[in-house]
Image: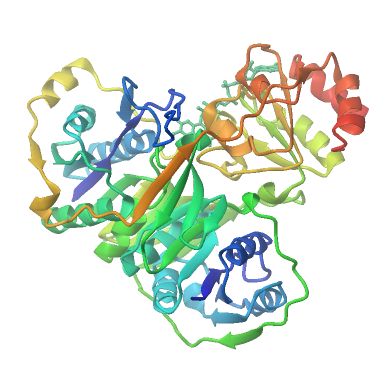
Amino acid sequence: MKVLVAVKRVIDYNVKVRVKADNSGVDLTNIKMAMNPFCEIAVEEAVRLKEKGVASEIVVVSIGPKVAQEQVRTALALGADRGILIETDQEVQSLQAAKLLKAVVDEEQPQLVILGKQSIDSDNNQTGQMLAALAGMPQGTFASEVAVDGDKVNVTREVDGGLMTVALTLPAVVTTDLRLNEPRYASLPNIMKAKKKPLDMKSPADFGVELKASLTTLKVEEPPKRSAGIKVADIAELVDKLKNEAKVI
Amino acid sequence: MSILVIADHDNGSLKPVTLNVLSAAVAIGGDIDVLVAGEGCSAAAEAAASAEGVSKVLLADNAAYGHHLAENLSALVTDLGKGYGHILTSAATTGKDFLPRVAALLDVAQISDIIKVESADTFMRPIYAGNAIATVQSSDAIKVITVRGTAFDPVAAEGGSATVESLDNVQDAGSSSFVSEEMAKSDRPELTAAEIVVSGGRGMQNGDNFHMLEKVADKLGAAMGASRAAVDAGFVPNDMQVGQTGKIVAPNLYIAVGISGAIQHLAGMSGSKVIVAINKDEEAPIFQVADYGLVADLFEAVPELDAAL
Ligand SMILES: Cc1cc2nc3c(=O)[nH]c(=O)nc-3n(C[C@H](O)[C@H](O)[C@H](O)COP(=O)(O)OP(=O)(O)OC[C@H]3O[C@@H](n4cnc5c(N)ncnc54)[C@H](O)[C@@H]3O)c2cc1C
């Protein structure tokens, strides 16, 4: 079966962002960018399905600026077979991303679509669910285990109370949580091979999707700062402070 | 325009976070209806009817909604939601699962995890693991929103007298079904609602050592939390993860033991009133946000703390 994986170029998770002085957004100039960690987990899961003989082809798609080719190439180096980049320099909100991905689903007809549960920049946690709704597919969100079984997939989900397993009829959408797998690193030979794999450049207009956003960011601010408090010498002083100064125990 | 709040509940009882979501609805302003969709959930509906500020409770009691499957629940909420100006639910895993489907089916954006209502169309929400706070305005006719419960004080659980109206709207997509669940059983308070949280990280070294922390937690009536590293290593189950991609907590007291204080962890607990850090590395970033820091080996400090309480 064919698996479609969506990946996003975001700020590297180790970077602490700074808010711009004019409060128009965060400063991304000269900042290290990378594949969203949850998307790496999505690619890894697809590659494992292929290694198990469950998946026959892995198509990776990204939406973003031209440089997002880097993230598509990374996915190809990790084992995806072919890539699509829907190129745009505009801000793409979740609903528009979902509409573009729906158009790709219509074209590619995958049996399984795997996405990260959230991107670590906008922290929305929406696109996979929106895509599933638009494509009329069931969804297994926040997956920690994915088991394809004939025309069904069983997905174990990380939910607030623990774990919950659902059975979905294929085609279906899965969004990844942290414990689904531990992504591999791309080897040098595979990085070289990935340069020769096909990467299709598309535009939103090719899919007839207009990127009109209904959310406007009015301003972006620093969160209230917490300042470091004091160091206590021992447990006795700690308990005393908690009882008599902070009065929280 | 009126507001539809989708209640959080486990069929048997209403979850307290619903009262926090209602508080966000009150801040938006307008008539508030609450939907309780589940199976055998009439007690939860009665509880919602007595909450402050609720005009009407809609009860959809059917096996199709028993496990809150997103496919069925989103079809129901999309159907009902067309008549409302705002649709709100908590940013718990159920809301995160079904609500984006509703937004897509209504062809509107979703505003995730709001922490403040500026006006009926403008909201504040954290982005970049809480390192920035965005103020966003929506031009959509229906605003679809998840609410961060800890950011809103709850409305009163009692005093309301809303009517309960039963719906016979059954949406069963048939494409998903419940197989099984493994829910953590604990007599401790629920993590996101607890007054005190005791969390352990990779420094705990193994799951057995968490018993030390449990003893402290039980003396304090606290909930137990953990860092991602402790969950990934299998010391404790996933429902204990605090952070950007786990649970958001804001207790009166948060005690972090053997946790370094990565930005992703801070995103989940920096709203706590008082933070205590116990770590043997005096350079650990957790000390930059801790009100009281103790540089010590946790294997000595935690038993001492237990004895001192
Ligand atoms: C996409 C993504 C999402 C993430 N989401 C989350 C999230 O939601 N929540 C989260 O917590 N993390 C999250 N992380 C992981 C995060 O980046 C850190 O890796 C993690 O928080 C580290 O956990 P830790 O502090 O327990 O471990 P470490 O960073 O290894 O710290 C262990 C600490 O224990 C101390 N220690 C060790 N032994 C002792 C001892 N005997 N006595 C006292 N102190 C001791 C050490 O000094 C150290 O400071 C995420 C990462 C990514 C990439």
Q: Do we see residue A137 in this rendering?
A: no
Position in image of residue A42 (x %, y %): 32, 40
The image shows a total of numbered marks equal to 0
> In the figure, residue B253 lies in which quadrant?
top right
Image: B24 above or below B226: below
Q: Quadrant of the C terminus of chain B?
A: top right
> In the figure, residue A195 lies in which quadrant?
top left
Instruction: Please say which color scheme the image uses.
Output: rainbow
Q: Residue at x 59, y 30 (%)?
A: B230
Q: Quadrant of ligand 1?
A: top right
Going by the image, does A248 lie left or right of B71?
right
Position in image of residue A135 (x %, y %): 25, 63
Q: Residue at x 74, y 47 (%)?
A: B194
Going by the image, does B66 lie left or right of A26?
right
Q: Do we see residue A2 in this rendering?
A: yes
Image: A192 above or below B215: above
Position in image of residue B257 (x %, y %): 71, 26
Image: B33 above or below A191: below
The residue lying toward the viewer, choosing from A90 and B40, is A90
The residue lying toward the viewer, choosing from B155 and A215, is A215
Q: Residue at x 52, y 38 (%)?
A: B244
Position in image of residue A90 (x %, y %): 23, 42
> In the figure, residue B11 lies in which quadrant?
bottom right
